[in-house]
Image (cartoon, rainbow, N blue to C red):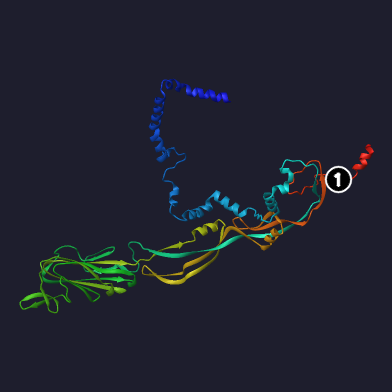
Amino acid sequence: MRSMRFLVLVCLTLPLAAPAANLTRDQALQLGKDFGNANNTGVSNAASSPDLTTVPSYQGTNVPETQYYGSGLGIEDAARQALPNSEVGSFVQDSALSRPRFNIDRNDPIVQRGDAISADPEALLGQQLTGQYSGCQEVTTTTAPATWSEEYCTEWGMDQQIGCQKTLNLSCNRPIECDAGGINLDSVQSDMRWTYTYPYLTIGTISDNYWSGYCAVFDRSTTFTIEDINKVQEFTLIQAGFDDWIKVVVNGTLVYVGPYGGDRLEVVTTGRFRRVQYGASSYGWCELSTSWNKSLNIDIKPYLRTGLNTIDMRVIVAGGGEGWIKFKATQYCDCQWSETWESTCGALEQQAQAGMCVQQSQTCLEPGETRLIDGIEVYRDCWRYDLSYLCATGETREEPYCQELRDRGCSQVNSTCVSTLTDGSCYEYQQTYRCPQGNAATQTVMNCGGQTFCLDGDCFDAGYEPNQDFGLAASHLG
């Protein structure tokens, strides 16, 4: 093997021998320095900035595990949620909860013997550790084995109470347009054109100079039925177009006089002229030479009522003129209620399905009451629940008798599951202990046939009882 190594070394060095033989010592030294310097940068970069693509199994920086960075215990929550559907996780958990339970106490004879040997091996093994033979020696043999009894105690799986809460959230989903007992569009009657495109009601024609006269008064009336005023969300006068004057009255209540405001709108004669009176001492010419388009925000819902309603409009024209008004009218529609429960019980519910937890109680913290949601009174029997679950911890507790058995020097020899949970994991174990009852009967004999290796010095009849008839046998030989 040594000659083979030499042959390989010679083969490897032969190609380099010829050119090196022509170099002086200094030239060879300089050649080595140049070679080292030429590769210094590559070696340095490999140490400080390694090419990660050369690392085995490198997956890059965007790996799924990055989501757990800085999330605290988030990785534990993810593990608990994934546990019920993980074959490996379920196997490990089931094994932990179902395997036999053995508790080896410090006072167990096996541990005691091991401690004694560790503390002073030579005291127990004697000359067997020295390699010296001393001839015959006294040994203690067992003539009758010790007697043992079986004792039993119980060990239970430990569990804990875990609480969580569920809170009811309601949201009202209404269609964009509906007739929910608010404005009954079929009941609209008017002596002029009207249009309704949700949510806008327009009374009158939006145009120019379709009326004519000098100080001419045009009165128009529109009626409609509201089936339930409580379901009318908004009824607002938002726009008025007129030439030259306008007055709007809702169910007998004056809501607007334009363009200058006022408390009335009448054509009166003062001296030789006809004029428009819009206040106790406020007058104006009939012709204002303007087509007004006023943006308004007048809430007229307070003047409406369940049943028949009337909107009166007066327009005063000089020359040519027009008049129209526009309302924004919205209604509360019947709700399509969406119920969602905001819950902190998700992980516990999954563990309950897997049999690791059992729901013990459900208590209503916010019992039946009526609440106002989106302007609608809603009643529910309970708005928030507190739930309590009993969950296995994977740990166990035992009755005091188990410790008493270990204190007596008993050793556990078996573990039997006698009660399981719904998921098959063991909840109650019967532990079997082997306890010393009677000591072994022993006898000291001389063993001259070779030493027996006994770890604790308690060897079972490895020699023979001394023969007291040696003298008699010798005399017969003589």
Front-most of residues 147 and 339: 147
Furthest residue to the bottom?
A: 280
Q: Position of residue 50 (x, y in %)?
A: 41, 39
Looking at the rendered structure, the secondary structure element under dot 1 is loop
Name the residue type under label 1.
Answer: Pro
* Quadrant housing the N terminus: top right
* Residue 270 appearing in the image: yes
Q: Quadrant of residue 72?
A: bottom left
Q: Is residue 145 above or below residue 402?
A: above
Residue 465 picture location, percent across and down: 85, 46
Q: Nearer the viewer, residue 130 or 3?
A: 130
Q: In this rendering, is residue 57 above or below 360?
A: above
Name the side, left or right, on which 443 lies relative to 112: right
**Residue 17 picture location, percent across and down:** 45, 21
Q: Position of residue 432 (x, y in %)?
A: 70, 56
Q: Quadrant of residue 192?
A: bottom left
Residue topped by disc 1: 466
- Mark 1 nearby-residue class (10 Å; few <14, some 14–19, many ≥20): few
Number of disc labels: 1
Q: Quadrant of the C terminus?
A: top right
Say above or below: 1 vs 439. Answer: above
Asked if residue 113 lies left or right of residue 76, the reply is right
Q: Is residue 455 visible?
A: no
Q: Is residue 232 left or right of residue 269?
A: right
